[in-house]
Amino acid sequence: MTNIAASYDTADARKAMIDSQLRTSGVNEEFVLGRMLAVPREDFLPANKAALAYIDRSVSLDDGGYLASPLFYGKLLLEAEPMPTDRALVIEGGSGYLAELLRPLVAKIDVLEADKAANVTSGAEATYSLVVIDGAVEALPDGIAQMIEEDGRIVSGLVLRQVTRLASGRKVAGKVALMPVEDIGIPVLRQFDKPKSWSF
């Protein structure tokens, strides 16, 4: 079966994505643009949605996951500032795209599906200098916070008052807090919703 994306030049589509979506929104760092130019987004979509790979919003996947917008990934990488010495954890939103963007920029990378990450308990065996979450969360479980080493960084989407924002944080004195950076459309990872409570 022929991939739909093979019918047009995806290298040109990636260049147009960079010029019209990333550069115009202030994402100009070469390490970000280089990775997003190198990794074909269509490879992370089902064949019937490959033609949507370079639109300026997220694309839903058949299994309920998402491939987020190019701008989200560009801003996330920019905020994360991955280093060659980083041991990184990607909490996966369903596509696998973020891990592939990050892979050559760090020393080691592990991937954890969102369902498993939402249920991580304390006493994690591994710790990481960088954690990135491929989606927006309402709450960060304690188990994930414990997987960040002291002075380690985390970059994620964050849901505040029903608005999604890019957010980042650092572990200081054993505590992690996500601070909003800017409003941006990000798929919400419902596995990290806060428990609903009654109000009177």
Image: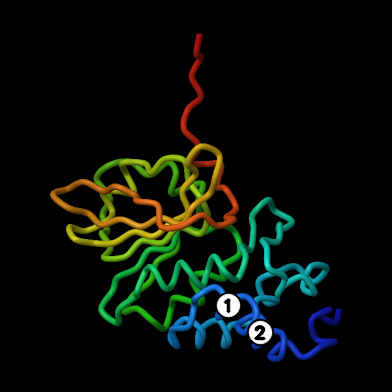
Q: Residue at x 19, y 61 (%)?
A: 151
Q: Disc 2 and disc 1: Cα gap in Å?
A: 14 Å
Q: Is residue 153 left or right of residue 112?
A: left
Q: Residue furthest left?
A: 173
- Which comes sooner in the sequence, label 2 or label 1? 2
Which element is circle 2 on?
Answer: helix
Residue picked out by circle 2: 14
Q: Crowding near pointer 1: few (<14 within 10 Å), some, many (20+)?
A: few
How far across and how far down the image is residue 149, in percent? 21, 58
- Horizontal side, residue 2 vs residue 90: left or right: right
Closest to the observer: 52 or 182? 182
Q: Quadrant of residue 108?
A: bottom left
Q: Residues within 10 Å of mark 2 (few under 14, many from 20)?
A: many
Give the colour scheme shown: rainbow
137 above or below 181? above
Q: Which amino acid, mark 2?
A: Arg
Residue 64, compared with residue 29, is above or below; it is above
Q: Quadrant of the N terminus?
A: bottom right
Please state the horizontal and vertical placement of residue 178, each as a whole percent of the image.
34, 50
Look at label 1 and name its amino acid: Thr
Q: Which label is found at residue 136?
A: none
Q: Is residue 186 above or below residue 37?
A: above
| Secondary element type, mark 1 | helix
- Contact, CB < 8 Å: mark 2 with mark 1? no
Q: Which residue is mark 1?
A: 24
